[in-house]
Amino acid sequence: GAGVSQSPRYKVAKRGQDVALRCDPISGHVSLFWYQQALGQGPEFLTYFQNEAQLDKSGLPSDRFFAERPEGSVSTLKIQRTQQEDSAVYLCASSSKGRTRGTEAFFGQGTRLTVV
Amino acid sequence: SQQGEEDPQALSIQEGENATMNCSYKTSINNLQWYRQNSGRGLVHLILIRSNEREKHSGRLRVTLDTSKKSSSLLITASRAADTASYFCATDYNTNAGKSTFGDGTTLTVKP
């Protein structure tokens, strides 16, 4: 596709429910990032993949959060036993190179998760 | 806490005026990027400036970087109503190869 695609766009989950958020990066992009954006704040880093390798998961807030990118393209962010504080927009971004030199990241529209 | 902090938090101007937003950060960086986010949408990359650069231009956008003061500014000239959005700076540290660290943004309103 032309850009980074995320699905679903909106998700309402009952507290305690598990959710899975999908990201389709731009074809051929090596790097993939997940960010969490609370209302009125900037995105906060969750995790980073280079191809299928998860190189940094230091931003995942708890062990209820899990991300994978098994074939180095599509990625899934899974949140188990959702809590109200998990309500946020989850943004996925991809870039064409590894990040050691800094390259432009292309963001998807995000998934707005509301936990009720 | 966020690495970058934008100033001001909110800015309201008339169409045709210039808008200046500032970003300060705390530790050494590889590069700094500016993004725009329209309400309810994803982030759009505007400009990347590397730590050895002092100024970059792109159309009506001008970005400066002062590494001695650990600050950057984004200037939008001849603003338009369509420039209304939130603007974020994002820093890439020396010490990590992956993530960008975002500030909380400046909300710009351009009145027609």
Image (spheres, coloured by chain):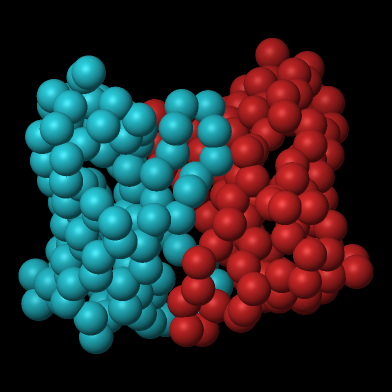
Residue at the spot 25% in from the left edge and 54% down from the top edge: B61
Q: Residue at x 17, y 66 (%)?
A: B64
> Where A8 sits versus A106, above or below?
above
In x, y percent, where is residue A42? Answer: 41, 42
Compared with B1, B33 (above or below) is below
Q: Is residue B17 left or right of residue B85?
A: left
Q: Can you name the residue that lies furthest to the top here?
A: A116
Work out whether residue B19 can be spotted.
no
Q: Is residue B14 left or right of residue B97?
A: left
Figure quadrant of the C terminus of chain A: top right
- The cyan chain is B
Horizontal relation, residue B15 to residue A9: left or right: left
Residue drawn at (44%, 39%), measured in percent from left and top?
B37
Query: What colour has chain A?
Result: red
Q: Position of residue A46 (x, y in %)?
A: 59, 54
- In the image, A62 versus B29, the foreground residue is B29
Location of residue A87 (image quadrant) = top right
Q: Position of residue B31 (x, y in %)?
A: 34, 74
